[in-house]
Amino acid sequence: MPNHIIIKNKIKSFDKKIGISPDKSISIRSILLASQAVGVSKISNLLESEDVLNTLKTIKKLGINFTKKGGVYKIQGFGVNGFNISKNTTINAGNSGTLARLVLGLLVKTKFKVKIIGDKSLSKRDFSRVIKPLKIMGAHIKSKDNLLPIEISGTRFLRPIEYNENIGSAQVKSCIILSALNTPGITIINSKVSRNHTELLLKFLKYPIKIQKKKNIERISIQGLNQFKAFDYTVPGDISSAAFFIVLTILSENSRMVIKNVNINKSRIGIITILNKMGGKIKLKKIKNYNGEKIADIYVKSRKILKSINCPPSLNSSAIDEFLIIFLAAAKAEGISKFKDLGELNKKESKRLDLAVQFLKLIGIKVKRFKNNISITGNPKLKLSGNFVMKDFLKDHRIFFLSCITALTLGGKWKINDRDSIKSSFPNFLNILKILGAKIN
Ligand code: S3P
């Protein structure tokens, strides 16, 4: 199969109920925590994407066995720091920053040295944000220029710290929380609000973790060296994957969609708040509590007119993976939309802020960039014709998804390279588009 797709036609109107792929952040966390529980955990509806499969391979390399039967993964844990590590272990985190950063937290007491490597994109990403707090806790870490490969060797002399996490990165926060499980005493993180799945899962497991919220800072206290029992868990749907279908529906003609059982954790639904401020009229129905998280069905329909937005930076973290597709909505909105303080976008699988500016220019949209702020002059009448070849935007799944949704809503003849990139987060993406009637070759 070629590693590109061709889209030559806009999608016709649709009215469908769909399920979305399981949440990537929660899938990775449920595996890593099951590897630290006492007993056999059973995880259902795990996302079977490369990032998650690499997480399973990682725990296996660290001596944790698992089996899969009838869609349920059974993971045999031996408690916190219960890895059975052999000499010269290398972990390949592939494309996943979440896996690489979170597993470092679990390895602070490793018996033998472990080396972490990753793919080309991950090898360009900066790890100083996790190396710094782990070293303050006493971890032994070696890396050149804070990049992969990273070697971590265990220490028995870990100390609890109080750390101010001011990037708003859930990967950093979670890395420290996981290392705190191995650390005597109470570790405290004063964290700028970011996705809180690690905390919710630990609370669900009755682990002694306390969270106090003051404005946009969360003070998280973790009591180290406690054990927790194996658990049963079903992963909810991923709002970051649903995001592309929400915008597809809003920008398509006479269409409606219901997306079932999507995780609507407050720290993730910035996209809904932003699109609704733009006149999106997205509704959440059948809201339920779900293993410490919340889920809902998302109802969305086409909107003829969207308004521009002056996006409050307080929403940045809860929409951090969705800005690319939000920019497409802004490109079709009336007026000038403004987004600020988005430097973190350039630290993702690719330099997404730089690429977003290039992409919007490619489709004829006026964009102004000043440092990490951008303004997008929308054109509600925007229609595309002619040929578009997406070959310069390599190895970022979300750039691939953005290109497909643009082609299907705005037209033009598109050749989109890097079909394989979808495997990291959403292998089922193209199948769902086909169910909705999209013609993709
Ligand atoms: C993630 C956190 C976010 C997000 C990433 C997944 C996680 O990264 O962009 O796709 O699962 O913790 P940061 O924590 O670096 O913002």
Image (cartoon, rainbow, N blue to C red):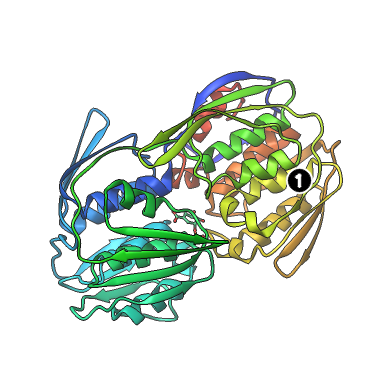
Whether residue 441 sits left or right of residue 407 in the image: it is left
Residue at disc 1, CB closer than 8 Å to ligand 1: no
Q: Residues within 10 Å of mark 1 (few under 14, many from 20)?
A: many
In the displayed structure, would residue 435 be above or below residue 226? above
Three-letter code for the amino acid on which mark 1 is drawn: Ala
Q: Position of residue 136 (x, y in %)?
A: 35, 81
Report the quarter where the C terminus lies: top right
In the displayed structure, would residue 278 be above or below residue 158? above
Task: Give the camera-side residue of 151 and 249.
Answer: 249
Residue labelled with disc 1: 330
In the displayed structure, would residue 260 be above or below residue 157? above
Q: Position of residue 177 (x, y in %)?
A: 34, 64
Q: Residue at x 28, y 48 (%)?
A: 31
Whether residue 303 sits left or right of residue 170 in the image: it is right
Q: Residue at x 51, y 57 (%)?
A: 194
Q: Residue at x 55, y 65 (%)?
A: 347
Q: Position of residue 147 (x, y in %)?
A: 43, 74
Q: Quadrant of residue 356?
A: bottom right
Residue 139 shows in this picture: yes
Task: Give the camera-side residue of 212 and 354.
Answer: 212
What element does badge 1 sit on? helix
Q: In this view, which residue lies farthest toward the top?
A: 15
Residue 142 shows in this picture: no
Q: Residue at x 27, y 74 (%)?
A: 152
Task: Give the camera-side residue of 270 and 189.
Answer: 189
Q: Position of residue 414 (x, y in %)?
A: 68, 39
